[in-house]
Image (tube, rainbow, N blue to C red):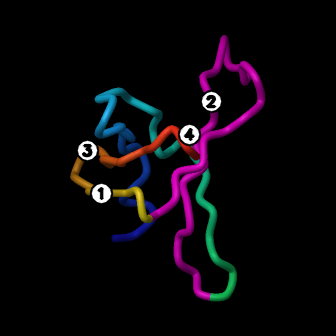
Amino acid sequence: MRLSEMNGKEIIDLKKGERMGVLGQADLEIDENTGHIKAFLIPTMKWFGFKKNGTEVRIPWRNIKKIGSDMIIIDFNDEF
């Protein structure tokens, strides 16, 4: 799958059943040596276009359970 095909997919937390964001709003952490995706970096909730507290949630690639046609299902643990 190409990165361009992942753009716009909703990211859904499997355990909580809640939407975490849209991949177009997220950044990717990529291993410079291998080119493999290490993690998704999802900005925290925004308030009128400004970041609320300036942090982001890091979702390691191993927590990605399924990439479908419309969404990405993750198994996100609160320990990250």
Q: Nearer the viewer, mark 1 or mark 3?
A: 1
Mark 2 secondary-structure assignment: loop
Three-letter code for the amino acid on which mark 1 is drawn = Lys
Q: Which mark is residue 70?
A: 3
Q: Is residue 40 above or below residue 57?
A: below
Asked if the residues shown at circle 3 and circle 4 are in contact, with their CB atoms under 8 angstroms apart, the answer is no
- Please name the residue that numbered disc 4 is placed on: 25
How many residues crowd around disc 2 within 10 Å: few (fewer than 14), some, or many (20 or more)?
A: some
At label 3, counting other C-alpha atoms closer than 10 Å, the crowd grade (few under 14, some 14-19, many 20 or more) is: few
Distance from Cα at disc 2 to Cα at disc 1: 21 Å
In percent of width and height, residue 20 lies at 45, 33
Q: Is residue 73 magenta?
A: no
Q: Is residue 27 left or right of residue 8?
A: right
Q: Nearer the viewer, mark 2 or mark 4?
A: 2
Q: Alpha-carbon distance for marks 3 and 4?
A: 15 Å
Disc number placed over residue 44 in the picture, else none: 2
**The disc label shown at residue 80, or none:** none
Which residue type does callout 2 highlight?
A: Thr
The question of residue 44 being in magenta is answered with: yes
First in sequence: mark 1 vs mark 4: 4
Structural crowding at the residue carrying mark 1, measured as other residues with C-alpha within 10 Å and reported as few (<14), some (14–19) or many (≥20): some
Sequence-first tag of 2 and 4: 4
Position of residue 66 measured from the top left corner of the image (x, y, whole percent): 26, 56
| Callout 4 amino acid | Gln
Which is more N-terminal, label 3 or label 2?
Answer: 2
